[in-house]
Image (cartoon, grey):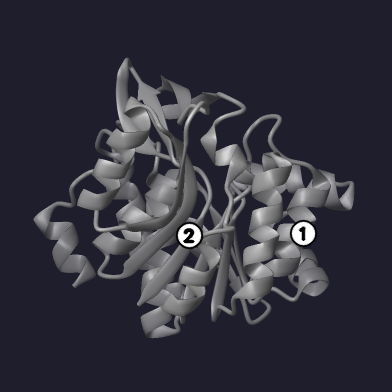
């Protein structure tokens, strides 16, 4: 099972400690931990954080041939503030992942085909260069599943960016708070989850919509039906990366089972585990590994 992931590589600074992260990188790492193979398209600076990122990405088993390394542009960082484990973010701008370029890497990626899964989000699209590169990539390469995890961050999205993402994806994932934001942005009204999913699927021809709701579990809309799955109680230590872990586990197991409900049930377990430990890419417990086997 192979995934190509597009977007930000950055360092989350949590309580003064730096953790390698960024939603696309977190997805790639957890997809690999589930048993898949992942390649990432991104950019880092030719600086200490950039080379530490490359070193850790290599250890995680993620292919990084399509990661630009830029002199004079810093690697991305995010200051993360936790309140009862729930994060808020201050995200630096004009960093390396705002300038992702595929001029040299695209021919190599085309030779690596096929990738079964393509993953992208919204943050890396805030800058025109990376946004254009994403469009170039989607036009050049076919994928069986295109997973759009919207991951809204303040001042980093527009209605046009979200609509363009929805036009390209086959699976759309967001959290319960984002339902309200996107409802108002796209449809000019607040919609209940089931109505929202119906509007999205009718307008954009998406096959699956996933709405996560932290400890309340998740909702999965497929075949014109909304299924709600209970969450797994956990004492939240650090929710950073939990949603990305959910996405990766869902996508990996959906590719195998073709059953969205079963995949979401297992993804709930992975996301809950990550929320209960520090850092976005923690080591998995033996119990969790057995569940994934």
Q: Is residue 119 above or below residue 154?
A: below
Q: Which residue is mark 2?
A: 5
Q: Is residue 13 above or below residue 226?
A: above
**Is disc 2 in contact with disc 1, using a CB cutoff of under 8 Å?**
no
Residue 291 visible somewhere in the drawing: yes
Could you classify mark 1 by the number of other residues whose Cα lies within 10 Å: few (under 14), some (14-19), or many (20 or more)? Answer: few
- SS at mark 2? strand
Query: Observer-nearest residue: 76 or 204?
Result: 76
Which label belongs to residue 164? 1
Residue 216 visible somewhere in the drawing: no
Between discs 2 and 1, the one toward the N terminus: 2
Residue depicted at 62% across the width and 35% down the height = 153
Query: Observer-nearest residue: 86 or 25?
Result: 25
Residue 216, image x, y percentages: 46, 49
Relative placement, left or right, of 160 versus 127 is: right
Residue depicted at 54% across the width and 81% down the height = 144
Residue depicted at 39% across the width and 39% down the height = 21
Which label belongs to residue 62? none
Residue depicted at 39% across the width and 45% down the height = 242
Relative placement, left or right, of 261 versus 210 is: left
User: Which residue is the extreme one toward the right?
Assistant: 188
Q: Is residue 16 above or below residue 101?
A: above
Query: Observer-nearest residue: 239 or 44?
Result: 44
What is the quadrant of residue 164 in the picture? bottom right
Q: Is residue 255 above or below residue 190?
A: below
- SS at mark 1? helix
Distance from the alpha carbon under mark 2 to that under mark 1: 17 Å
What is the quadrant of residue 120 in the picture? bottom right
Residue 271, image x, y percentages: 36, 51
């Amino acid at each position: 099972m192979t995934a190509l992931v597009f977007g930000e590589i950055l360092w989350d600074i949590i309580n003064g400690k730096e953790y390698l992260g960024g939603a696309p990188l977190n997805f790639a790492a957890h997809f690999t931990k589930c048993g898949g193979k992942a390649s990432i398209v991104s950019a880092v600076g030719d600086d200490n954080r950039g080379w530490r990122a490359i070193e850790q990405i290599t250890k995680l088993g993620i292919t990084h041939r399509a990661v630009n390394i830029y002199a004079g542009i810093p690697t991305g960082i995010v200051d993360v503030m936790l309140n009862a484990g729930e994060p808020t973010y201050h995200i630096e701008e004009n960093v390396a992942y705002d300038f992702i370029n595929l001029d040299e890497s695209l021919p190599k990626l085309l030779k690596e085909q096929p990738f079964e899964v393509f993953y992208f989000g919204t943050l890396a699209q805030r800058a025109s260069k990376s946004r254009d590169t994403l469009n170039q990539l989607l036009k050049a390469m076919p994928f069986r599943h295109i997973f759009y995890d919207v991951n809204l961050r303040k001042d980093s999205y527009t209605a046009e960016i979200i609509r363009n993402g929805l036009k390209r994806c086959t699976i759309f994932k967001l959290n319960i708070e984002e339902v309200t934001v996107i409802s108002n942005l796209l449809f000019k009204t607040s919609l209940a989850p089931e109505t929202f999913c119906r509007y999205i699927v009718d307008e954009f021809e998406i096959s699956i919509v996933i709405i996560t709701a932290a400890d309340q579990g998740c909702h999965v809309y497929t075949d014109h039906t909304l299924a709600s799955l209970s969450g797994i109680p956990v004492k939240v230590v650090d929710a950073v990366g939990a949603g990305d872990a959910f996405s990766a586990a869902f996508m990996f197991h959906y590719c195998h089972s073709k059953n969205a409900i079963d995949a979401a049930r297992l993804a709930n377990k992975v996301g809950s585990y990550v929320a209960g430990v520090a850092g976005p890419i923690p080591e998995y417990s033996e119990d969790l590994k057995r569940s994934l086997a």
